[in-house]
Amino acid sequence: MKILILGNSSIFKRKVYLGLKNFRNLEIEVASRGKVIKKKLISKSYNSYSDALNKTEAKLVYISLINSEHYKWALKALNKHKHVIVDKPITTSFNETKNLIKIAKKKKLLLSEAIVFQYDLRFKKVTENLDLNKSTKIFCKFHIPKLQKNNFRYFRKYGGGCLNDMSPYASYLINFFFKNKNFTFIKNNKYYFNKLINKFDISLRSKKVSLDASFSFDNDYKNQIEIHNNSKIFYIDYFFSPPINKKLKIKVYDKLKSNQKIINFNRQNVFYSYFVDIFKLIKKNKFNFFYKEINDREKIKKKIS
């Protein structure tokens, strides 16, 4: 099998490639406007995205470009009859995303936004033991330090801003914890710097579930979730972007027993787990789950915006 990567991005080099290299009989082609560093599985490189789409035999395209380029190249790839994965955010507008879903459905192609933290075994361990019919409180923070001043995330024309970049995380959590539930926004605050949103805070409530979340640029690093359910509190660090080079853990505090235990986990590349799912679904030709997930999350992102 072949996969074409559009964009030799940092996320591709640091995480996506390391997830893909564990698959046998997989060839990776990379299209980049810059130099592509030679790696074991990279069988071919292109210096033009258009040439790559016209010449490649790959059936799957992973788009890892600046946010403002996502829609353009996802559309071109779908029209070349390619399955498409797009780094978050899938696009920078609800109408663009709806159009991609419409085309993917018509052509019976995969369309996926690369949100992968839900493949973290720690998240699976916690959520499979939750009872969302009981009182549940979720608190999470994802703050990142100051980026280089020329980073595209600081420029509106490139689809920058914290809301574009981090609302996919928020929309996934809302869709997961409040699915089929009536909920109300108690707080939906946005903070601006140089006319661009660099922080947003949200609070939601349903009958049994509450979520308080904060996302920001240019802040002390925080990447965590805390879930209160029944008598237990679950704490997961490095939640939204789990590192692949260290062992991770869950802290569990039992209020009834007044004790804390730590559950340790082996190293995991969540991108590998994500691609296992992707390749299975391509083989089965079953994509409706992804269409619905993207559409539901985009509706939530629209409310946050």
Image (cartoon, rainbow, N blue to C red):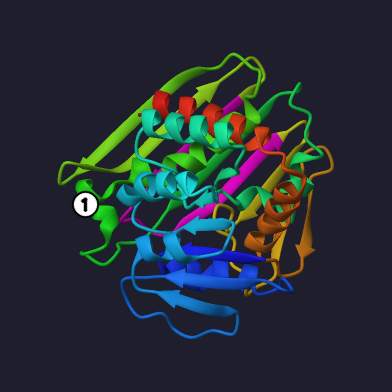
Split into 4 quadrants, where in the image is the N terminus?
Answer: bottom right
Placement of 257 over or under 270, stated as above or below? above
Task: Give the residue drawn at x 66%, y 18%.
Answer: 180
The amino acid type of the residue labelled 1 equals Phe
Relative placement, left or right, of 209 versus 31 is right
- Say which residue appears at 75% left-offset and 47% top-offset: 124
Q: What predominant SS class does the magenta segment belong to? A: strand
Q: Position of residue 156 (x, y in %)?
A: 21, 46
Q: Does the segment drawn in magenta span residue 89?
A: no
Q: Which residue does the numbered mark 1 point to in the structure image?
A: 155
The answer to which of 231 and 216 lies nearer the viewer is 216
Q: Quadrant of residue 291?
A: top right
Q: Nearer the viewer, residue 40 or 236?
A: 40
- Residue 135 position within the rendered picture, expressed as x and y whole percent measured from the top left: 70, 24
- In magenta, the rendered stretch is 210-228
Residue 256, visible in the rendered structure: yes
